[in-house]
Image (spheres, rainbow, N blue to C red):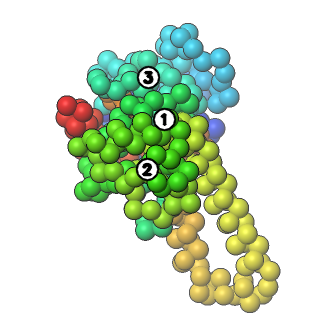
Amino acid sequence: MIRLAVDGMGGDFAPKEIVLGTLEALNLYENIEIVLFGNKEAMAPYLKEHKRLEVIDVPNAFDMGVKDIGIDTIRKKDYSMIAAMYYVKEGKADALVSAGPTQVLVFGSQFIIKPLKGLERCAIAPLIPSLDGKPTYLLDAGGNINTKAEHMLGNAIFTTVALREVFGVEKPQVGLINIGTEVGKGRDLDREAYELLDKHPAINFYGNLEPKEILSSEASILLSDGFTANIVMKTMEGTAKAMGQMLKREIKASIWSKIGAVLFMKKALKNFKKSMSPDEIGGALIAGLSKVVIKAHGSSSAYAFSNAIRQAKTMVEKDVIGKVEKALG
């Protein structure tokens, strides 16, 4: 049985959507047990008894706009996310899922759960859409601004194993986001990372990759530092949203467009929306850690959160952490 720790109070729509998503996941997956951390009184209107659900009463929760994160943050065991982290650290659960503030989750994971031996930093690795529909990781999507080439190598190894074991991608190609495809392009960081990635036996290196290829390249792992990758991710999100609005505007422009949309394009439009929806993925992997941690979207619905739980469950089922350890040597 897989045991998961869930932060019941993290997220814009917590605790309602988190509790409902947790119950949905328990009904969908018979091989999981969930320990839900949060304020029992606040969660009570949405809770139902379930034989594989345990609730641990924790009075406090972080505001989504929390600031001044530091060493005192990880001492707050009376906060739902931190209590769940220590539960995982102590080996009482196999993974953690939270929709709470990203900064706290990354900082706390780094210093409570801690990276795997041989890795220095954890990194945010969301799955992003691609034209051919293949699963694609983008990282580090905001976890570390001061990234080193060695961190990028570790990120590449971790996500290579995750893609192979969880998604069945036999030899994921690793692309290094850069301003040009030629060898020697970019900053010192990029050139150092290129050399490490090109030589490592566990990496199937694609080479440098320009941002215009993000959605269309053969690479399934797209690497950069936290600043650059975060800009790439937010640019993609904004572009997708704007394209959707433009398409909606054009469809509404004439009665024939509306009829055509209803008669011929309804399924295609629905599939397009689904392919760009973060709800289908559920959240981002925090790569590099000694335990599975999934950062669900802050605005998660119950459906989205249940998908984040599914992602954590699958990572544990496939023993991703153990196989990364072997790949690291």
- Going by the image, does 99 lie left or right of 27? right
Amino acid type, label 3: Gln
Which residue carries the number 1 mark?
189
Residues under numbered marks 2 and 1 in contact, where contact means CB atoms less than 8 Å apart: no
Pick the front one: 16 or 247: 247
- First in sequence: mark 3 vs mark 1: 3
Pick the front one: 85 or 129: 129
- Going by the image, does 178 lie left or right of 92? right
- Residue 2, position as x, y percentages in the image: 27, 37
- First in sequence: mark 3 vs mark 2: 3
Amino acid type, label 1: Leu
Q: Is residue 40 visible?
A: no
- Residue 156, position as x, y percentages in the image: 36, 42
Q: Is residue 234 visible?
A: yes
Disc 3 residue crowd, few under 14, some 14–19, many 20+, Cα 10 Å: many
Task: Work out how far the residue at label 2 is from the one at label 1, CA to CA, in angstroms.
Answer: 13 Å
- Tell me if residue 49 comes above or below residue 136 in the rendering: above
Amino acid type, label 2: Val
- Going by the image, does 88 lie left or right of 165? right
- Tell me if residue 277 comes above or below residue 4 in the rendering: below
User: Residue 183 bears which disc, if any?
Assistant: 2
Instruction: Point out the image quarter for the C terminus.
Output: top left
User: Residue 110 bears which disc, if any?
Assistant: 3
